[in-house]
Image (spheres, grey):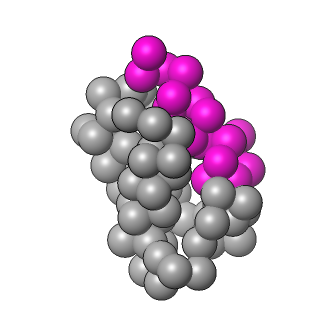
Amino acid sequence: MSREEIVAKLIEFAALSFKVDASTLTEETNLNDLGTSSVLRVGMSASIENEFDVMIPVARFGNFETIGKLADFVLEEAE
């Protein structure tokens, strides 16, 4: 899967998890601006783990500032 495809999926997951319009999100979107609720983050993290077969500890999820940085992590872990 290409990085662009991963970014597109992450945008989809972020829109669903944080209940925002996907068209307003880009890879530069700051995840903290979407919300800091751990429940919402766990939901997005679970979607990512299921889709890409990677493990993201909840405590580490907060370290990814943007959707793009999260995409880079997924790309590295999925290899």
Residue 64: horizontal and vertical position, in percent?
A: 68, 43
Q: Residue 43 colored magenta? A: no
As drawn, which residue projects farthest toward the left? 50
For image coordinates 52% across by 80% down, the residue present is 23
Q: Residue furthest top?
A: 79
Considering the whole magenta stretch, tell me its main secondary structure: helix
Q: Nearer the viewer, residue 8 or 74?
A: 8
> Is residue 66 at all visible to an observer of this figure?
yes
Query: Considering only vertical position in the picture, is 19 above or below 2?
Result: below
- Horizontal side of residue 40 vs 34, given as left or right: left
Vertically, is 64 above or below 10?
A: above
Query: Which range of residues does the magenta coloring cover?
Result: 57-79
Q: Is residue 63 above or below residue 44?
A: above
| Residue at 50% from the left image edge and 32% from the top image edge | 74
Q: Split into 4 quadrants, where in the image is the C terminus?
A: top left
Q: Nearer the viewer, residue 55 or 4?
A: 4
Q: Is residue 74 magenta?
A: yes
Relative image position of residue 66 (x, y in whole percent): 69, 53
Task: Answer with the quarter of the image where residue 29 lies.
Answer: bottom right
**Residue 56 located left or right of residue 46:** right
Q: Position of residue 10 (x, y in %)?
A: 46, 54
Identify the residue shown where x is 62% and y is 53%.
Answer: 67
At 52% from the left edge and 39% from the top edge, which residue is drawn? 3
Image quarter of the N terminus: top left
Left/right placement of residue 60 relative to residue 48 reads: right
